[in-house]
Image (spheres, coloured by chain):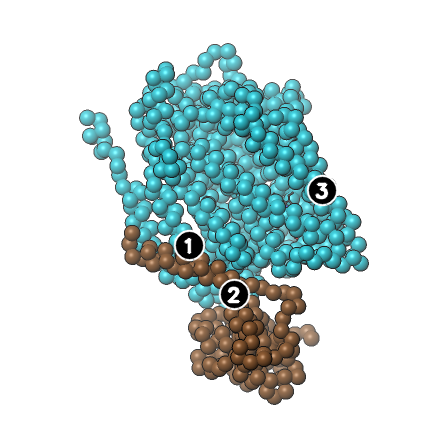
Chain colours: A brown, B cyan
Amino acid sequence: MSLPSMRLGSGWIIGMTLLAGCSAEQRTLVAAQPTSPPTGPDDPRIAAIKGNFYQISQGGRYFTWYGCTSCHGEPKTGWPPRLPFVTYYARIGHKGYDRKIAAEQRWQISAYLNSLTVTDAAKRHRQAVDQKGEPTAGQWQGPL
Amino acid sequence: MSQRHEQLQATWSDPPGIWGFLTTVNPRRIAARYVLTAIALLILSGLLALDMRVQLSQPQMHRMTAQLYNESFALHGSTMLFLVSVPVMEAMAMWLVPLMLGQRTMAFPRLNAFSYWLYLGGVMMLWVPHTLGVTPDLGWFEYPPLSGPSYSPGHRADIWAQMITFTEVAALAVSVNVAVTILKMRPPGMTLAKMPAFLWAMLVSAVMTIIALPAVMLVTSMLIADRLVSTHFFSPAGGGDVLLFQHLFWFFGHPEVYIIFLPGVGFVSAIVETFSRRRLFGHVPVVLSMLAIAILAFGLWVHHMFAVGLPKVGNALYTAASMAIALPAGIQIFCFIATIALGKPSYRTPLLWIIAFILTFVIGGLSGIMTASAPLDLQLTDTYFVVAHLHYVLIGGAMFPLFGAFTYWYPKATGRLMSDGWGIVSCALIVGGFNIAFFPMHILGLMGMPRRIYTYGPEMGWGDLNLVATGGTVIASVGASIFVANALISYWRGKRSGADPWSGSTLEWATRSPPSNYAFADVPVVQSAAPMWDNPLGPFPVMRGLSSRCREALVTSLVDANPQCRQPSPGPSIWPLVAALVTSALFVGSIYTPWALVWGAVPLALVLTAWFWPTRPRRKEAQA
Ligand code: HEM
Ligand SMILES: [Cu+2]
């Protein structure tokens, strides 16, 4: 058969294997989330959380909710810089945020920041547009 | 005669072995596959339902997590509607329509094969990822923004959306085939006025499918586009509209319930007629009601959206339209009751299923009138009342007639009868269990129990009725197991049925059971809508002239069914399967990259060219 269909065929196989790595799709709603900071770069929770779509997208929502955009603006190419996960986690603690943001959510925001460095601009944009209705710290005018 | 039989049998046979399996274009072989796949999924998804009912049987159960429950009802609902109800009805049409027309095959035999393979692709699209732990979790209609790029990261929503594309292309293929076959391949004498109600039902639901399904394919494709290439159809901040999704979805979704229900009406008409030993009472009103339903069904979809805050005038209009559709449905029910009452009914298992249908569907219709009223619906929507209602109409209105049809035509398909005794037991258990399971849900709904919750607190006071509901489900499951066992055992042990065990009224009973490859050596000539009863003594009048050496079918005129030409009919071919594989690659690929549409189109074009490459000699050579 022709080349494109072979490419598609292999795409299908790759797709299915990606699906097989299904922990990326896992969605945990029970209280099995981290409650303490990462113990170091080798903490096994890091790989689990930063590879999970649900945790990343939750992190994206908190990023808006806590008003990170009011100083940093919308994420753009070059921001955030590519840093180790533990560094993201530590930096989110700045300006007293360590007292405002629960550990679980800091994990998720770190995972989100980490994902942004590999997310292309189009995807970042469409997720941002989709979330325009989310409350934003400082600018929220709806009911509290 | 027997030499002719040999010759016809050879002309219409498939190649032996696996190659024959892959290339067959015999509508009965393909339809049997369709039905069996759908029944397997009915069982799987029924087990999911049982699992959910166990979870809900008591307050504060934690054997299922919320996420698992979400996945379970999403998989259950999507499977039941997209992979079971619609396909199984179409498969029944594929099996029965050519036989009822006294034809050897359908208008586009290869299209049937293509349709089945794509349907199988849709089944795999949903269930293969499920076995890998990736299951859609947003219910059977996945509204944005919940299913949009931001709130449904990963591929769960894409899998759901693309499963729909698969099954809807498959459904469109069968529907076109059924509609053309009924319109252009009726036997001489079967004018539109003398067409059995069953064929009308299949025709109307095929046409409805052709009109309704593009809407859902469009809307799921738009969703995928939103998720993949940032089209913002459904994101308000990008200039889109979330309600657009609901409008397009329900423009399909409401007609869909009638696409499932009308074939049920077709089964009921056939079974009621045969077992009441009397022509269908009110043939004309029944057919006109089908047409009325088909038209009204496209003007009701907003009753699924009463709670989203549309203008009051709109809500009132759609309330009125929804009530109006109760009239034609009611007329049909009255005609069925009148047929039984005026005939000499023999209460064999198929007729019992029909009586179960009438009782259950009326309850579902009544709760439908309640949810159709906008003010009441504000209270009822998203509660268990809706769960009760939808199961009363889907199970009562479509599954019971289907089970009746299964028992009724089982001897035609296998040459053996299912046991009547066990048939009655399974019917009683399923119908009884069903009512015990679902009637309490009306009350639970009125008490405020929301649908799609994985557990509830003991203080809500919902525990007892939920336990009853689960008990009913268990009873129904026992009945279902007996039904399946009865079907399996009768396949080998059942009493031999002969061609016409029930003295049926329509043409499928004129040929042997199971039908030979070619089904009919000559096309019967009919005089009424119950042709088998026209001249009970004499042999059937037939029209001769179709070749037995090459595949040929008779084409007749649209209204009067006057013979027009002999149409060559294509033989077995591998191309439908190849085309389905290439289409599947395109569909699956387009979850990951929009370029799959472009690059996938190239091999698809090549395969379709090969498929349609002319193989017959040109006319002049053929005549020489
Ligand atoms: C005895 C058999 C069945 C049982 C016990 C059953 C039970 C259930 C349960 C427990 C739910 C979830 C309700 C909720 O949490 O909101 C459900 C949902 C549903 N069922 Fe069934 N079911 C059965 C058969 C069927 C059949 C035959 C069909 C269709 C032909 C069907 C169609 C649906 C649909 C469309 C939903 C809604 C899913 C959603 O919320 O998105 N069910 N059923
Ligand atoms: Cu509706």
Q: Residues within 10 Å of mark 3 (few under 14, many from 20)?
A: many
Report which residue position mark 2 lands on. A24
Q: Mark 2 to mark 3: distance in Å?
A: 38 Å
| Image position of B9 (left or right of B384) | left
Could you say whether the residue bearing mark 2 is in a helix, strand or loop?
helix
Same chain under badges 1 and 2? The reply is no
The subunit letter for the residue under badge 2 reads A
Task: Give the residue at mark 1.
Answer: B587
Q: Nearer the viewer, residue B186 or B23?
A: B23
Asked whether the residues under marks 1 and 3 belong to the same chain, the reply is yes
Chain letter of the residue carrying label 3: B
- Amino acid type shown at disc 2: Ala
Q: Indicate the position of residue A20 as horizontal and vertical percent values.
A: 48, 59
Seen at 32% across and 46% down, the residue is: B608
Q: Nearer the viewer, mark 1 or mark 2?
A: 2
Label pair 1/3, CB-CB below 8 angstroms: no
Residue at the image point whose x is 73% and y is 50% from the top: B57
Mark 1 residue type: Phe
Which of the two residues, B517 or B285, is positioned nearer the viewer here?
A: B517
Depth-wise, is mark 1 or mark 3 nearer the camera?
A: 3
Residue located at (57% from left, 73% from top) = A45
Secondary structure beneath dot 3 equals helix
Which residue lies under the disc numbered 3? B472
Q: How many marks?
A: 3
